[in-house]
Amino acid sequence: MNKTFLLTFIIILFGFIRIDAQTPDNTNPKDPFFAPKSQQEQASKVQHIHSDESGVKPDQYEGNLVFSGNVKFEHQGSVLTADKVVLYQKENFLKAIGNVVLLNADGTKITAEEMEYDGNTERGIARKNVVLTDPKQTIKTETLYYDRVPNTAYFNTGGTISDGQNIMYTKSATYYVNTKDIDFIGHSTIDAKDYTIESDNIKTNQTTQISQFLAATTIRSKENPRNYVYTELGDYNAKTGISHLKKNSRIHYNDKILTGDNLEYNRNTGFGKGTGNVTLNDPKENRYIKGGYGEIYEKKDSAMITDKAYAVKIFEKDSLYIAADRFLSFQKPDSTKQKKSYLRAYRKVRIFKTNMQARADSLSYNETDGILHLMKKPILWSGAKQITGDEVMVYMNTTTQDIDSVKVIGNAFAISKADSLNMKDEFNQIKSKWMGIYFEKGQIKKAVAVENAQSIAYADDQDEKTKEINRIGVAVSVCGEIIADFIEKRVETVTCRVGAQSDIYPMSFMSKEKRFFPDFNWNTKDRPQKWKDIFEDTPNYPETVYESDNSLYEKAEAERLKLEEKNKPKTPVREKR
């Protein structure tokens, strides 16, 4: 027998005898992580495979056996290598020091400066510059707790996880090696090529690349950091780029915000949709749209809201409320390449503003320039005025928020109370093919009717001394162009041009029927009186009843008939034969 081999064997044997003799309990103060499992089966022993040197020093490592130089141990298919290993033989426990590598049968590899491993519980703790690698990712941290039975790795000292494309930063995380799930605990960040995810609780699977969000989470675009999604419950599929957002969720895009009970967003296409209490907020336009369902198209900078939808545009002194079956909101540059905001509404459009109310089938609103275009049977009310036509365009002052002018295209018909302070059925009326109505400080200043223009206007005169208004009669005009000037809500002058035919008739010559155009329709039942009326197809208010005074005409007509009868030639009486 080789003398050197025999001497080494005696030293090792003597070392084991001395350990048993000097430290019969062979105890080791271990981390609580190594606490025995309940009903633990008899564990196999860690096996020493190789080392350059081994021995016992009573003054080191509590007198336990120390292996050094290319040390290799094996346990349940896992192989550990290190510069030095201290073996607590009775406890089936070891400490590895220097260039530690633990290679598991499933391909998982852990490297560290130090490691403790318990063969009974099959748990290990790696410390200092710890790196865990497997085919899916690399974990780097300072302290890693590894449990072979459920095959999990855990750290709470801060670390990074990289899958070759994304880098994840977190304080604490648990990695489930078999399923490739990672549970991030506390605030964490995922840094991808085109976006970042920040969350207070993420669970992600490295195989499916699906992340679940269980707390406040933000997914933010790197190209445009102002574009991001926020949720407190949801998931994200990195393969498809689709997020499902289920609690307190928001999609921020192009300075707009979409919220709803349930949201979905595709980061690749920029398409998003929401259901349940959907709101599209546009802070730059001071406008939001609400409904039961909505869609956004980030790359086209457009959105659609429907299902009991309504929009509110907030002004400094007032708000504009619009309801419709469906809204489209979008931005696009005009001919000067200035980007402008547009709002379109379809079917059953109802509008309420303190100084303006309207109804139409559809609407187009240039919010930037303040141009409101009403189409298909529009009707517009402002104060004691009503305007109808094939199309009505309202031009609003974007600074004062008042109406600057109204353009009516096709079958224009403007009606205004001759005196808004009484309940008499006296209305000024202008009809034409085209009409322009101009306002000043919220009141009509002038109306211009062009092509087949007709008007019925009450003519008044003011006593210079008493300032009393006296009714002269009714002016009836038919001409190519009519210009009506208003002073203090009253028609002051009516100018008839181009083929003029204009006459003023005293009240005694104008019957009630002749004071109205045949298609006169003063609509009070459909006019919204408060903003919540926009939610009704029609508020269906009782028709306003006006006082009708036809007494002057009836009296004059009776006198005319009497005079006519009186002036009839008498028929001579024939003599009887």
Image (tube, rainbow, N blue to C red):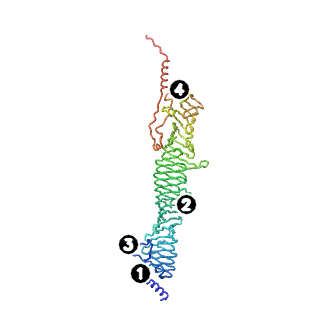
* Residue highlighted by disc 2: 194
* Residue highlighted by disc 4: 506
Q: Residue furthest right?
A: 336
**Residue located 49% across and 16% down the image:** 569
- The answer to the question of whether label 2 and label 4 lie on touching residues, with beta carbons closer than 8 A, is no
Relative vertical location of residue 155 with respect to residue 419 in this rendering, above or below: below
Q: Position of residue 227 (x, y in %)?
A: 54, 56
Distance Cα–Cα, label 3 vs label 2 = 49 Å
Is tag 3's residue or tag 4's residue first in the polypeptide sequence?
A: 3
Query: Which of 559/31 is in front?
Result: 31
* Residue highlighted by disc 1: 24
Distance Cα–Cα, label 1 vs label 4 = 131 Å
Query: Which of 512/569 is in front?
Result: 512
Q: Is disc 1 placed on a helix, strand or loop?
A: loop
Q: Mark 3 is on which residue type? A: Gln
Q: Position of residue 154 (x, y in %)?
A: 47, 68
**Residue located 55% across and 56% down the image:** 226
Is tag 3's residue or tag 2's residue first in the polypeptide sequence?
A: 3
Q: Nearer the viewer, mark 3 or mark 4?
A: 3
* Residue highlighted by disc 3: 39
Q: Mark 2 is on which residue type? A: Asp
Is tag 1's residue or tag 2's residue first in the polypeptide sequence?
A: 1
Distance Cα–Cα, label 1 vs label 2 = 61 Å
Distance Cα–Cα, label 2 vs label 4 = 80 Å
In the rendered image, is residue 409 in sight?
A: no
Q: Quadrant of residue 466?
A: top right
- The answer to the question of whether label 1 and label 3 lie on touching residues, with beta carbons closer than 8 A, is no
